[in-house]
């Protein structure tokens, strides 16, 4: 039983761009790279579906980055509060050692 070939994303992009630019036809690409026309068509369709994401506004990315920064600040504050609570608890738990009592 033959194993399926896997292709790097860079290779897929190269093939799709060659087809979309008109430098080579689908048939030429199939012969050159020994691919089935359905594979190239699927790559092209996937590329065209996801192309708008390339030009998406950075607001969505900045919103994610803003959320990450908020969570990092929260983690830092909670860590600081935990350290303070540990120090205070050792102060109250430790026996009084003044004057040997």
Image (tube, rainbow, N blue to C red):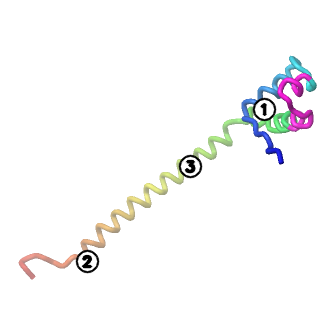
Majority secondary structure in the magenta region: helix
Instruction: Give the image location of residue 37, x and y in percent.
Output: 92, 33
Residue depicted at x 77% and y 30%: 13
Residue 54 falls in which quadrant of the image? top right
Above or below, 82 against 8 in this view is below
Q: Residue furthest left?
A: 99
Q: Indicate left or right for 53 with 38 as reference.
A: left
Report the residue marked by disc 3.
68
Q: Position of residue 3 (x, y in %)?
A: 79, 45
For label 3, count other residues whose C-alpha is less than 10 Å away and answer few (under 14), some (14-19) or many (20+). few
Camera-near label (1 vs 3) is: 1
- Cα–Cα span, label 1 and label 2: 66 Å
Disc 2 and disc 3: Cα gap in Å?
37 Å
Circle number at residue 59: none
The disc at residue 12 is 1
Disc 2, SS = helix
Mark 1 secondary-structure assignment: helix
Query: For the magenta stretch, what is the residue range?
Result: 28-42
> What residue do we see at 38% from left, 64% from top?
82
Q: x, y (%) of residue 34?
A: 85, 29
Residue 93 is tagged as 2
- The residue furthest bottom is 101
């Amino acid at each position: 039983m033959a194993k399926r070939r896997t292709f790097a994303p860079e290779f897929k992009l190269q093939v799709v761009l060659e087809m979309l630019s008109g430098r080579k036809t689908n048939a030429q690409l199939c012969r050159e790279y020994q691919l089935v026309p359905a594979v190239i068509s699927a790559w092209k369709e996937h590329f065209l579906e996801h192309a708008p994401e390339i030009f998406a506004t950075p607001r969505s990315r900045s919103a994610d980055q803003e959320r990450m920064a908020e969570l990092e600040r929260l983690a830092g504050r909670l860590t600081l509060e935990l350290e303070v609570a540990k120090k205070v608890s050792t102060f109250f738990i430790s026996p009084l050692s003044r004057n040997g009592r």
